[in-house]
Image (cartoon, rainbow, N blue to C red):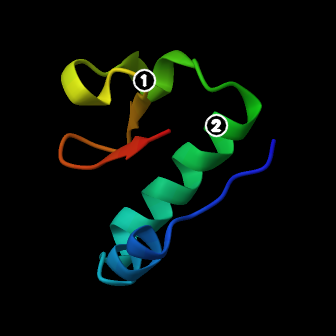
Amino acid sequence: MKIYYSSKFEREYKKLSKEIKKLAEEKEAIFRENPFDSQLDTHKLHGRFKEYWVFSVNDKYRVIF
C-alpha cells in the first residue's frame, strides 16, 4: 500500500507531541496491515466528506483516507 501525505498534514504533524506521533505511527502500522482492524475504529464519514474514511489515533486525533 502506498500512502501519500499532504503538505498540510506534514506541517501539522510536526506540531504534535512526541507521544501523539508515536501513537500515530503505531496506528499507521496497523492500518498498513489491515485498514479495518478493530483497534483503529475505522468508519465512513458523512456529509460533504462522504467519500472518505477515517481511523482514530486517540480520542482527539483521527486520520482521514
Q: Is residue 35 left or right of residue 54?
A: right
Residue at point 53% right, 44% down?
Answer: 27
Pointer 2 local density, CA inside 10 Å: few below 14, some 14–19, many at least 20:
some
Q: Is residue 32 left or right of residue 59?
A: right
Which residue is the site of mark 1? Answer: 51
Residue at point 43% right, 29% down?
Answer: 52
Q: Is residue 2 above or below residue 31?
A: below
Give the CA distance from mark 2 to mark 1. 22 Å
Q: Secondary structure at mark 2?
A: helix
Write down the quadrant of residue 37 in the picture.
top right
Closer mark to the observer between disc 2 and disc 1: 1
Which residue is the site of mark 2? Answer: 30
Residue at point 64% right, 37% down?
Answer: 30
Quadrant position of the N terminus in the picture: top right
Write down the quadrant of residue 25 in the picture.
bottom right
Q: How many marks?
A: 2
Q: Amino acid at mark 2?
A: Ile
Q: Position of residue 63 (x, y in %)?
A: 41, 45
Q: Position of residue 65 (x, y in %)?
A: 50, 38
Q: Is residue 12 above or below residue 62?
A: below
Q: Amino acid at mark 1?
A: Glu
Q: Is residue 44 left or right of residue 65?
A: left
Residue 4 shows which numbered tag?
Answer: none
Q: Residue furthest right?
A: 1
